[in-house]
Image (tube, rainbow, N blue to C red):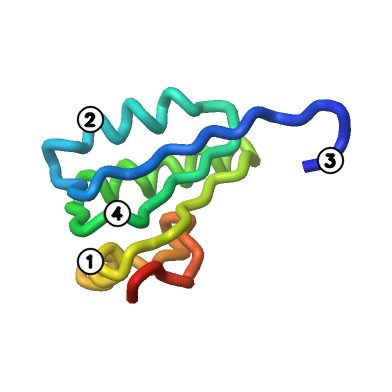
């Protein structure tokens, strides 16, 4: 971003296990960054369940509606594989195709 009005950017490291029990905490962490560019580090993720996936999909849509940058970086090989099982491409959640450890 260029110019004098530079937006603060938020970074969140995702938990290793993103099961249903972690969905509320994930939603809260993402909501805390609302209105600013957000980067989620998925390098430690070993498992993602459907509810956390829904949180990520909703967050990406919300950031897109606000025309604000949202990205998931360092996608672990395990998370990449889990997304495939769930029928979702990394791009659909805002992740770069390159994976960490795949």
CB contact under 8 Å: marks 2 and 1: no
Q: CA distance from mark 1 to mark 4?
A: 13 Å
Q: Which residue is mark 1?
A: 82
Q: Position of residue 45 (x, y in %)?
A: 27, 55
* Number of the front mark, 4 or 2: 4
User: Would you say 7 lies left or right of 11 here?
Assistant: right
Residue depicted at x 62% and y 39%: 68
Of callouts 2 and 1, the N-terminal one? 2
- Which mark is first along the chain, 1 or 3? 3
Classed neighbour count for the residue bearing mark 2: other residues with Cα under 10 Å, few (<14), some (14–19), many (≥20): few
Q: Which residue is mark 4?
A: 44
Q: Real-space Cα distance between discs 4 and 2? A: 19 Å
Q: Which residue is mark 3?
A: 2
The mark lying in front, picked from 3 and 4, is 4
Q: Nearer the viewer, residue 73 or 30?
A: 73
Lower position in the chain sequence, tag 3 or tag 4: 3
Q: Which of the marked residues, 2 or 3, is nearer the chain's N terminus?
A: 3
Left or right placement of residue 36 versus residue 75 in this view: right
Quickly name the residue at label 2.
Answer: 24
Q: Quadrant of residue 36?
A: top right
* Residue 10 image point, x, y percent: 53, 33
Mark 1 surroundings: few (<14), some (14-19) or many (≥20) residues within 10 A: some
Residue with the most extreme left position: 21
Indicate whether 57 appears above or below 11: below
What whole-number distance in Å separates the C-alpha atoms at marks 3 and 4?
31 Å
Distance of label 2 from label 3 (alpha carbons): 34 Å
Q: Residue 59: which quarter of the image?
A: top left
Position of residue 34 in the picture relative to residue 86 (left or right): right
Q: Which is more N-terminal, label 2 or label 4?
A: 2
Residue 14 placed where, x, y %? 33, 44
């Amino acid at each position: 971003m260029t110019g004098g009005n530079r937006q603060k950017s938020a970074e969140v490291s995702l938990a290793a296990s993103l099961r249903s029990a972690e969905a509320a905490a994930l939603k809260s962490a993402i909501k805390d960054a609302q209105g600013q560019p957000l980067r989620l580090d998925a390098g430690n993720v070993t498992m993602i369940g459907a509810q956390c996936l829904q949180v990520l999909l909703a967050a990406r849509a919300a950031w897109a509606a606000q025309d604000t940058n949202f990205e998931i970086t360092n996608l672990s090989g395990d998370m990449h594989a889990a997304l495939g099982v769930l029928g979702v491409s990394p791009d659909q959640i805002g992740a770069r195709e390159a994976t960490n450890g795949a």
